[in-house]
Image (cartoon, rainbow, N blue to C red):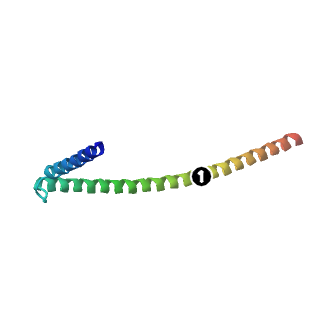
């Protein structure tokens, strides 16, 4: 008896929910002009957002390429700096050795 009551209550709730859904959605199968206008506006907005996104992605890729180029330039400049520092060190050592020979020979 309790199971039958539970089952009847469940069927009644499902039926009531179905009835509310059918009545709540309206009778027309067509969208109103206002709904169509809203849909078109949302579509345009979405397309605009996608265009902005694509533009930002291209800009990001360009900036990443510039960063890579600048890092390569920096590495080349650092290597050149190390070479110049090494040559300077060798020249100073050579000059110091020459001065010692001049000073020791007198």
Screen quadrant of the N terminus: top left
| Helix, strand or loop under label 1 | helix
Residue drawn at (49%, 52%) of the image: 67
Q: Is residue 22 left or right of residue 70?
A: left
Where is residue 78? Give x, y as percent. 61, 49
Where is residue 19? Give x, y as percent. 16, 50
Residue drawn at (27%, 57%) of the image: 47
Q: Residues within 10 Å of mark 1 (few under 14, many from 20)?
A: few
Which one is nearer the viewer's eye here, 42 or 84? Answer: 42
Q: Does residue 67 show up?
A: yes
Which one is nearer the viewer's eye here, 90 or 8? Answer: 8
Q: Does residue 106 show up?
A: no
Screen quadrant of the C terminus: top right
Where is residue 56? Give x, y as percent. 37, 53
Instruction: Provide the residue designation for mark 1.
Output: 75
Where is residue 60? Give x, y as percent. 42, 53
Q: Is residue 52 left or right of residue 12?
A: right
View extreme (front): residue: 1
User: What number of labels is visible?
Assistant: 1
View extreme (bottom): residue: 30
Relative height, residue 87 to residue 100 (above, below): below
Q: Is residue 46 left or right of residue 106?
A: left
View extreme (right): residue: 105
Relative height, residue 97 to residue 27 (above, below): above
């Amino acid at each position: 008896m309790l199971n039958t009551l539970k089952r009847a209550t469940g069927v009644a709730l499902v039926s009531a929910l179905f009835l509310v859904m059918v009545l709540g959605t309206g009778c027309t199968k067509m969208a109103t002009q206002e709904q169509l206008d809203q849909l078109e506006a949302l579509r345009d907005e979405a397309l605009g957002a996608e265009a902005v996104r694509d533009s930002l992605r291209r800009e990001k890729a360009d900036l990443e390429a510039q960063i890579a180029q600048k890092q390569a330039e920096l590495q080349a400049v650092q290597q050149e700096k190390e070479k110049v520092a090494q040559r300077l060190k060798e020249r100073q050592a050579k000059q110091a050795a020459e001065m010692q020979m001049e000073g020791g020979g007198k």
